[in-house]
Amino acid sequence: MTSHRARRGAAHALALSCSLVVLQPSAAREVPPPPGTVRISPGSAQLLFTPWDDAESQIVAALRGARREVLVQAFAFTSRTIARALIDAHGRGVEVRVTADAGEAGRVERGRIDEIAAAGIPVWLESAYQSAHNKVIVIDADLAENVVITGSYNWTHAAQHRNAENVLILRSQRDLAARYRANWMRHQAAAQRHSPR
């Protein structure tokens, strides 16, 4: 009698544990992605390391391919070559806009911010932060062939020739480009329009 009850109790416990195992997967919820997660499209990523790789020429090539819009976030900006590529894009009818760190723009003797603004490109200076340290270029965010350029690389001669830097050029990543564009807009809205000296 006791062995029969013991067997029934063991069978009941086994059935209960099996039902818990069966219920567990349906009770478990899919873990949401971490904040800021962006869907990656089957585009491409080009990774460059200076001073060994010629990042500046790749940045200029991307700017030459711009069709509608170029948005720039700058900390330091002394590269004559990149400034010229932005001015040329503006001359072709591409809408070029720049935000830059206010303190750095006023401090750098050979900075290109005034030159860019004097060429008719709208520039806003950011002073709400200790450093507006973003180094980002967003090209044609609304097009399938968009480009996002980011990394540690400032738009400077030193970043190409004297520093150890990295540059990541992402192509055809619409969700990513849209997020970077939205972030640019948020920074521009809080910045002050710059007039060249």
Image: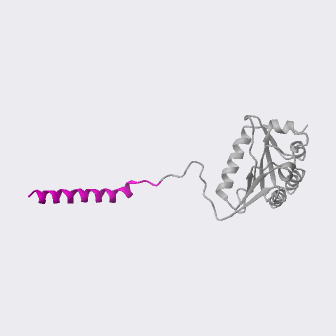
Instruction: Kindly report the secondary structure that dominates the magenta region of the rendered protein.
Output: helix
State the image coordinates of residue 45 (x, y, percent, origin top left). Answer: 70, 61
Q: Residue at x 28, y 57 (%)?
A: 17
Is the N terminus in the top left, top right, bottom left or bottom right quadrant?
A: bottom left
Q: At 71% across and 56% down in the image, what residue appears?
A: 141
Residue 137 image position (x, y, % from top left): 76, 52
Image coloring type: one colour
Q: Residue at x 79, y 51 (%)?
A: 164
- Residue 123 % position (x, y): 82, 43
Compared with 104, 137 (above or below) is: below
Q: How many marks?
A: 0
Residue 99, located in which quarter of the rendered image?
Answer: top right
On-image quarter of the C terminus = top right
Which residue in the rendered view is the most extreme toward the front? 3
Q: Which residue ends up furthest to the bottom in the rendered image?
A: 42
Boundaries of the magenta span = 1-30
Name the residue nearer the viewer: 40 or 95: 40
Image location of residue 56, percent across then percent down: 84, 56
Magenta run includes residue 2:
yes
- Residue 83 magenta-drawn? no
